[in-house]
Image: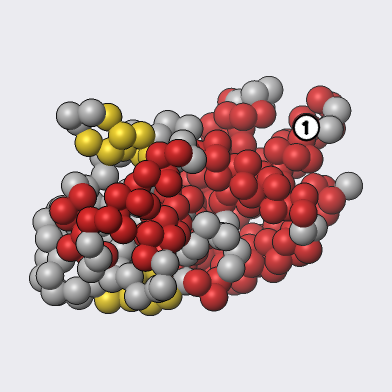
Amino acid sequence: MSPNWASIGTSSMRLPISSVELMNFRSILHISLSDKSTAASVNGLRAVRKTSLSDSIVEQITGLIAAGSLRPGQRMPSEKDLCQQFGVGRTSVREALRSLSVMGILDTRAGEGTYVSGTSRRYFEKTAQWALLLDPKLIDDLIETRLTLECQTAFLAARRGTRKHLAAIDAEIEGMRSSIAEPERYLEHDLRFHLAVAAAGRNSILENLLSMTRQYLQAWIKQTLAGAALSDTRRRAELSIREHRRILSALEARDAARARQAMRLHILSSSRDLRR
């Protein structure tokens, strides 16, 4: 789901945007890019209309990074291209890029350009961890959001998923199984499983919305695992793998109702485990 710098032509597109507060869905808008979009424009950026132009630019860029649309090591467009796409002057763009560089989210290299920092992912993980600590109700919001989004993506995946999609989902389960003694790797495969199911549903907006919740889910799981005994962690992992297999089985059978129910039971089961 990485942006394709050259993918936007002269016709308008509608894509979801989030703020750095990933769960604040009021900031997710359906937007149309201007006909002045250039070959170097970024999927998901829109003309700025807020009072603080640089803050709005920061919000949009951090939202794309948090959602995984901009990835560590990826080169940003030039200042000129960003000015044209945002519809602002160079001063606002430079202020925003400077702020993001100070936060360690972007890395400006003399003579090379500006890149998404390799440490940007850790920044968003920490932001999500602090948010969960400061407002425990976000966990309830996260569970509700997952039930709303993921049960539907499983339903759609059963109807629309191709053999290639199902193979990708199966590969993530195998990755979970082979890394059961390595929590970091296991968690990465677990999260990618859910994104793979969303991809199989072939609804790009649902897929992007699910991606936006990833940092909160990852932060919650890491907080829980940090205080868990090794034997308990392994028990949870083995149970989760069985639940993931049931979801895949329903997808392979093209049983949309069963896939939705299997996903619902998995989310509720894993949420109960994480709350203990």
Residue 137 rendering spot, x and y as whole percentages: 78, 63
- Report the side of 149 relative to 91 (left or right): right
- Spot the residue most to the front: 91
Q: Quadrant of residue 15?
A: bottom left
Tag 1: amino acid = Ala
Identify whether 136 is placed above or below 188: below
Q: In this view, does 64 lie above or below 237?
A: below
Total tally of numbered discs in the picture: 1
Q: Which residue is drawn at 40% across and 39% down?
A: 101
Q: Position of residue 61 (x, y in %)?
A: 39, 54
Q: What's the image's color scheme?
A: secondary structure
Sort mark 1 into few (<14), some (14-19) or many (20+) by Cα contacts within 10 Å: few
Residue 12 located left or right of residue 185: left
Q: Is mark 1 on a helix, strand or loop?
A: helix
Front residue of this view, candidates 155 and 64? 64
Residue occupied by mark 1: 226
